[in-house]
Amino acid sequence: MMAMAHPKLGLRPFLPADTPLLREIFRDSIEDLTADDYTEAQQEAWASVADDEKAFGKKLAGELTLVATLAGSPVGFAALEGKDKIDMLYVHPAAAGQGVGAMLIDALEKLASSRGAAELVVDASDTARGFFEKRGYVAQQRNSVSVGDEWLANTTLHKQLAAKREAS
Ligand code: ACO
């Protein structure tokens, strides 16, 4: 076997036909992976954001969305909004903890750099905050976001991309 994290893991741009599967990944990851951090009502409000398939597909197509595949099937996705905001990162629970999220964020960081972004910003869920901190993102502020009838907490984190040397 070759020295790869996972030999069957792949990465490709989003296609409109991916929308139904990405909706399922979105809902399943929220339901199965965020229960320690959010109430059932909060999870339901969050997952409902993708109920309107047409609107969700439009959002994915309007951003720079990457799809991670395992043996050819989508298992996760990440979306860059503009040149410097990570808007979405979701991995299917059956594929979590295998480096899929890391692969997606590495790729988005490279794309953002090539678009001229000096830093990346993300409003991370409490579930994903540790993931981003481990990758060098620094927490800046806590937020409370209104989703449907619920309020969900998240944290804004930043990461410098350019190898800029600070004056000391
Ligand atoms: N806290 C601390 N470390 C973590 C966490 C966590 N919650 N999650 C993953 N890690 C670590 C892993 O241990 C791993 O460490 P290692 O490289 O030393 O082994 C490293 O981060 C990479 O983990 P991956 O396997 O690449 O992460 P995964 O593919 O499981 O994806 C993700 C992580 C996206 C957070 C996934 O758990 C998920 O979908 N969660 C639910 C949905 C969610 O909250 N999404 C983010 C919403 S906020 C937004 O979209 C901007």
Image (cartoon, helix red, strand yellow):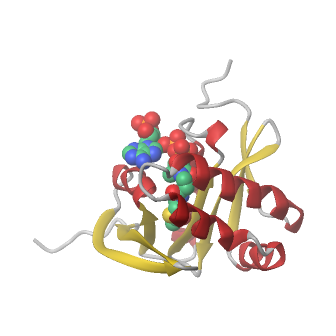
Q: Position of residue 143 (x, y in %)?
A: 36, 77
The quarter of the picture where residue 144 lies is bottom left
Q: Quadrant of residue 6?
A: top right
**Relative side of 117 to 66, left or right:** left
Please state the horizontal and vertical placement of residue 157, each as a whole percent of the image.
36, 68
Tally the marks.
0
Does the rendering let one see residue 104?
yes
In the image, taking residue 14 as reference, residue 133 lies left or right, namely left
Q: Is residue 132 above or below residue 159?
A: above
Residue at the far left in the pictured view: 168
In the rendered view, does 152 fall on the left or right side of 49?
A: left
Quarter holding the N terminus is top right
Residue 102 seen anywhere in this rendered image of the structure: no
For image coordinates 60% across by 52% down, the residue present is: 31
- Looking at the image, residue 119 sits to the left or right of residue 116; the answer is left
Image point (39%, 52%), residue name: 135
The location of residue 142, given as percent across then percent down, is: 31, 73
Seen as rendered, the residue at the extreme top is: 1
Q: Nearer the viewer, residue 164 or 57?
A: 57
Q: Quadrant of residue 156?
A: bottom left
Q: Is residue 35 above or below residue 164?
A: above
Q: Percent from the top left, x then y, of residue 44?
A: 60, 64
